[in-house]
Amino acid sequence: MMKKKLTPPCPACRWPMLRGLLLLCLLLTASARVQAQAFDGDFDWKLYGGYTLVGSHSGAEIGCDYGLNDWLSFGGKVSLLFVSDGSDDDHSDLIERYNFGFHLDAHGQEAFHLPSPVDVYAGIGLGFKVGDAHAGVRYNFGEVVGCYLQVQYNAFKTFGSPEDAWLYKDKFAVSAGLTFNL
């Protein structure tokens, strides 16, 4: 019996998943009655995770964010891409598919006088594979749960051999998911 290898869906098939996640976020937003601040500032801990699309490769990410003051936060993030070349005997190594890094973000909730459940942010990140610039928005449905949407550009390779960053370097990434206040 021949083993059939599972490969990720084509890039065009991934968009329905992303649209479904965004629709869920909109539905939760419409039904939310209790609102909390998307960014509280000092000692604000957030855990976040969701779907990411880097170039044409989909994956998952999880990270945390810590508020230094009302304007700045820092944190860490791990991304893992679901990649396979389609052959039966050759897989992309786990080492090639992940990126671990740190980020520093500037928050604009107070500067732009946004409603308390909304926060916009922009920042820079430095990972084991690439350095990036990113921007995003968060919306909190209540005291604990919210959602986020982030775009980033992976501008330059950082550490490792030149082949290590091929999945990430010089590619745009879009991420969407849920946030949890700790």
Image: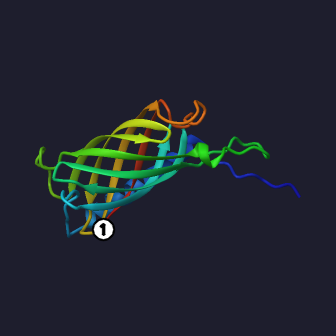
Q: Nearer the viewer, residue 22 or 99?
A: 99
Q: Residues within 10 Å of mark 1 (few under 14, many from 20)?
A: few
The residue that label 1 is drawn on is 182
**Amino acid type for the residue under numbered disc 1:** Leu
**Residue shown at the point (26%, 51%) measured from the top left:** 73
Pick out the residue farthest to the front. 160
Quarter placement of the N terminus: bottom right
Colour option used: rainbow
Left or right: 108 in relation to 129:
left
In the image shown, does 144 or 103 lie closer to the viewer? 103
Residue 22 % position (x, y): 38, 53
Residue drawn at 61 percent across, 32 percent down? 163
Residue extending farthest right: 1
Question: Dot 1 lies on which element?
Answer: loop
Q: Residue at x 28, y 68 (%)?
A: 144
- Viewer-side residue, 78 vs 86: 78
Expressed as whole percent of the image width and height from the top left, the position of residue 23 reads 38, 56
Using the rendered view, name the quadrant where residue 63 is placed: bottom left
- Residue 180 in which image quadrant: bottom left
